Amino acid sequence: MTGRLLPILRGCGEIFFVPSAVLGALLLVAALADPPMAAAGALCLLAAYGLAVLLRMQWLFLESGAYSYNPLLVGLALGHLLAPSLPGLLLVLAAGAATFAVTTALAGPLWSHLRLPVLSVPFVIVAGLAYAASYGYFGLHEAVRQTPEWLAGDFGLPFWLAGYCRSFGAILFLPLVPLGVALALVLLAHSRILFLLATLGYFAGTLTRAVLGGSADAAFADPANCNFLFAAMAVGGVFLLPSPVSFLLAALASVFTAVTLDASLHVLPALGVPAFVLPFNLVTLAMLGMLAYARRPLTSAAPGHTPEERLANHLANRRRYPGQERMLFLPFSGRWTVWQGFDGPWTHQGQWRHAYDFVITGEDGKTHTGDGACLHDYHCYRKPVLSPVRGHVVQIVDSLPDSPPGTTDEANKWGNLVVIQDPRGFCVELSHFAEKSVQVKVGEWVERGAVLGLCGNSGFSPQPHIHVQAQAGPAVGAATLPFSFVAYVNGGEYHANELPVVKDTVEPFYTDKRLDAIISFVLDEEFRYEILRGGRAVSELALKVCMAVDGTLFFQSRRGRLYFGKHEGTFYCYRVEGHDRWLNRLFLALPRMPLACRPGLAWQDHLPIGLVAPAPVAVLAEFCSAFWPGLGTVKVRLRFTDEGRIESVVAAGLLHPRVTGLVELDTRKGFASVAVAGLEFRRIKHDSASPPA
């Protein structure tokens, strides 16, 4: 039962765009201020869920909050507008089932075709139709309620503040100041950004109505101003990452909503239908459609339940994963130097801007010995060129002669070349091979690291070098696409997926099969750790390897999940979900690790500040990062101190203390111990991953 109730409560919490079961439960409790209305909301919600069960679609109902909050709002609206009666009960039940049907019919097409959310459009449609139909039904009457005078008053608040509080209560069809204050405080506790956006939206929209309508008292007294709260929160903090730009768009959305609200209040009453939150839905969908057409991202790929969490994860991920989706291995072995990169000063311009050139330099920094008059003087001449991807060879040129140093073949700019079709949907071209050195054939399948040929100086090339580029199709010299290199070392520092800069000396870093096996976790494996502080045991942590619906593995504890995975030679801890502080510490100690050990090898990572800073400071930093993004993340430096030992350091900052960590790998599987922030996690043997001898 709990497994079904919690998703429904989380869905109810999404009325405020926060999928929180606690918030959803509080909203239901708040609705009890009007018991008949609350009962209608609960019955409508049950009717919607009942239809989902009948059609064996309960998984869909529990998966998206729109299937919970829409029928809840429909029931609350009907319970607020209509007096309790048997015909009213039947109408509520029918409306609940209809809301599930309409939500199902709209949510899929809106998202798949337009990438737009369904919002509360089903609520507006079903509640409006049900209320319009009620005029022709026998036994249905408008509700007449007597709110106690003390509860309906302004409590001495200025008219603008009382109107602001009532707008929060109007979300539950109870425009009462005490209820509005309570809901505003609940929203503030869950998300400072959403609270600020709601406040900004309310006053932007209401002042617009006051200026255009000529009466501030009338503008601030209308409970329908709750539309402005929704519009600002949706545009500024839910479907866009919080930023000064998103706050400005939120204010604009509220202004547009004000005009739309006044228009609907002149049209809909003639049809006998309340406006509800139709203005919010129309304006929000229009704004999101505009942003989608302009190719601005509607949401971040980073997960999170609140704007603060999404923003913190986005800022960290932007620094954690600076590379591209088109990932290449370096096309050589040993150490080579970047001669020209993206937007290079010579040939990497315009449609060919995304390309790299590599040479080999000696200790003197030169690419050749002697005066460089002979091709064989160049360190990289006739060195093996390796495939940076796996795929089919689709183009080859192999017969062009090498040009003498300092001269170029302008008629055959790309020289001898190999084009490989990568199954990920793009091609890679490598150019300037030595004459008659290409060792693969068209149609042949090659794996990464396979020898393609030898480095030469054919084509438009003043000295021997390797040219590599990614492109959409197999045509020789096609327009280039962005890409990045994975698993390489530059000056003793490991890079998982980045782009080196000109004059960097880089070398590929290959996965160690033994270390890869140690960090290979299998479903249902269990690991137990004793947690010590100052040498004394304070708790235990049990972890089980599980898999999410998208295939990502995670360690499951009693209170949270730590998602992890391996990708292109690197082990990653992706994120923590839940409220398990021990998992946060494990994440902090080892956010990532190359799958090969070299004593002294260093690397860095960036993590959300909430993993390090005290809770009040983290809350402040996450809020302020909407305006100063640099406050939202911290840098972690890591290195192998020895075989199987990783040291990490988070340097002290203005908002957080210095934190050190030390991880020791088990010789067979996983982590033997983790020491971080004054705690030690010591592996308890005889778990499922380490059976007794």
Image (cartoon, rainbow, N blue to C red):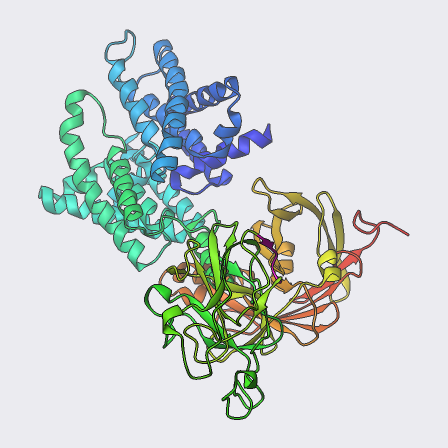
Is 636 within the magenta? no
Can residue 512 be seen here? The reply is: yes
Left or right, 441 with reference to 669: left
Along the horizontal axis of the image, is 290 left or right of 465?
A: left
Residue drawn where x is 69% and y is 46% of the image: 545
Name the residue nearer the viewer: 157 or 631.
Answer: 631
In reply to whether residue 448 is colored magenta, the answer given is yes
Residue 179, given in percent of the width and then of the height, sits at 36, 38
Rendered location of residue 250, percent (x, y): 28, 50
Q: Residue at x 24, y 10 (%)?
A: 136
- Seen as rendered, the residue at the extreme right is 693
Q: Residue at x 13, y 30 (%)?
A: 266
Q: Is residue 323 visible?
A: no
Q: Is residue 479 left or right of residue 667?
A: left
Write the residue at 34% across / 28% down. Answer: 122
Residue most extreme to the bottom: 370
Residues drawn in magenta: 444-449
Q: Position of residue 61 (x, y in %)?
A: 48, 28
Establish if 436 lies above or below 177.
below
